[in-house]
Every structure is written in structure tokens, then in C-alpha cells.
Amino acid sequence: MMSDAEQPPKPAPSAPQLSAVPLFPLPNVVLFPRAVLPLHIFEERYKAMTADALSGDRQVAMALLKPGWEKNYYSRPAIEPVVCVGTILSHERLPDGKYNFLLQGTTRARIVQEFPGLPYRVAQLQPLPETPVMEIDLEYERHLMHEVFGNRPLGETGIGRQFRKILAGPLATADVADLIAFNFLEDPDLKQSLLADPDVRHRVRRIIETVRTTLPELAVAGARVSGDASLN
């Protein structure tokens, strides 16, 4: 499976209806808008969730489990209040009833309330209000991104070259930053804080600064992602 940086990003679908969205809580997984996440579904409750989503608007919201989730994973462990809604792009139903599907993030959202009665979790969500910023106001940040992916050691990796192509395209700087956070940052708590940060310019700068201060480690990660088609 190709990584996000190995193919041109797909346009994000239009804003979804968020009155009743299935929640898929996982540890260590944080989805971002426009990023594409491959998922393998094998638990019975999430097989039901997938079937219902596919027969409806194909939406699933990824939620990060809070520490201590192991104690009641099969019940309703605590999750972070900000999630990323995604749309199922493609799916495969396996002979044993399991699923593989690709989920593309579309919307930052906050949980308003959860609804009981189903084997999986469903919630009313509200789009996360963000501080508006014009693309022209992020010219300096975009310049910094070009520097990061144009210089050694990250720029020499395959994924570094691919992100330079993305930066040369029409995708907004804030969207590119989200893809960078998804593909390069590993700390789930940091990624969650970036997902929940409503200040777009502040968020973009945080992502760039994190990448700049961890270039050697990211160069190794970039080479690994480029060479492993199973990673997203």
C-alpha cells in the first residue's frame, strides 16, 4: 500500500454531517484531515460498524484512547474529546467477514455526546472551530517547509522528494502540515495535541519546528516509509 506522500493527495470531501458518527478508538493512532489510513477490521463490533458505515455515508471518526484503556477496552474506555472524521475511500470484505479499508481524514471535530444502544460507539460531533488564516499569511511557513524537505538529510529520502512535489502543488500550507504530522511524527500525544490545536498558524509552526529539530531521526523514518509499501 502506498504512503500518502507517494501519490498526489486527493481533494478532501465536503464537510460531513456529524449528528451520529461511529467512533473507532485505538491506542497510538491519530488521523489528520487529508491523510489516508489503512485499517484491518476483525473485532465483531467493528465489523458491524464497518458494515453500517458502508451502507450509510461511509464515515468513521478515529479517536485516541487515553492512558489506562487496557482495563476496560471491551467496554467504553476514556478517549480524547477531539477526533478526526474520515470517509471510507475503498474497502475489501474478506471471506471470514473481516474488512480492510482505506479511511481518508476530512474534519477535525469535538465529541458533543455519545449514544448508547449499539455494539460500537456512536457520537454526535461538532466541527472544531479554527482560527482563520489566509494562505498569503503562511508564505514564510511554506518557505520553511521547502527548506526542510530540500536539505539533507530528510530531503534525500524518497518521501522527502515526494513532499517537495506536494509543496510545489496547489495544496494549502495547513493541509501539507497535517500530512507532514501524520507521516513523520510518532508521538501520539503530540499528534493529538496538534489535531486539537484550533490556531492554524500556531499548529503549522509547531509541526515545522518539530520536524526541524528531529531531522536525523526523521530522515531514517522517511527512508523506512519510502521503502515499505505497507506503511502509510
Image: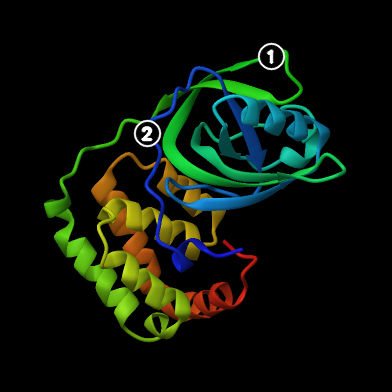
Mark 1 or 2, nearer chain start = 2
Please, is residue 119 above or below residue 187 in the view? above
User: Badge 2: few (under 14), some or many (20 or more) residues near its Cα, within 10 Å?
Assistant: few
In this rendered view, identify the residue nearer to me: 62 or 44. 44
Question: Residue 121, position in %: x, y?
Answer: 67, 25
Q: Which secondary structure lies at badge 1?
A: loop
Among the 4 quarters of the image, the one containing residue 170: bottom left
Q: Identify the residue at image location x=83%, y=39%.
A: 97
Residues at circles 1 and 2 in contact by the CB criterion of under 8 Å? no
* x, y percent for residue 21: 56, 25
Local crowd size for mark 1, using a 10 Å CA cut-off: few (<14), some (14–19), many (≥20): few
The answer for how far apart the CA atoms under marks 1 and 2 are is 28 Å
* Whether residue 12 is visible: yes
Q: Residue furthest right?
A: 96
| Quarter containing the N terminus | bottom right
One can see residue 77 in this view: no
Residue under label 1, please give it. Answer: 116
Kind of element beneath mark 2 = loop
Instruction: Write down the residue under mark 2.
Output: 14
Q: Quadrant of residue 48?
A: top right
For the residue pair 146 and 162, the one nearer the viewer reads as 162
Write the residue at 69% across / 14% down: 116
Q: Is residue 11 left or right of residue 229?
A: left
Residue displayed at 74% across by 34% down: 46
Image coordinates for residue 207, horizontal then vertical, percent: 36, 59
In the depicted view, which residue is nearer to us: 78 or 100? Answer: 100
Query: What amino acid type should be assigned to the residue bearing mark 2?
Result: Ser
Q: Quadrant of the C terminus?
A: bottom right
Numbered tag placed on residue 11 in the rendering: none
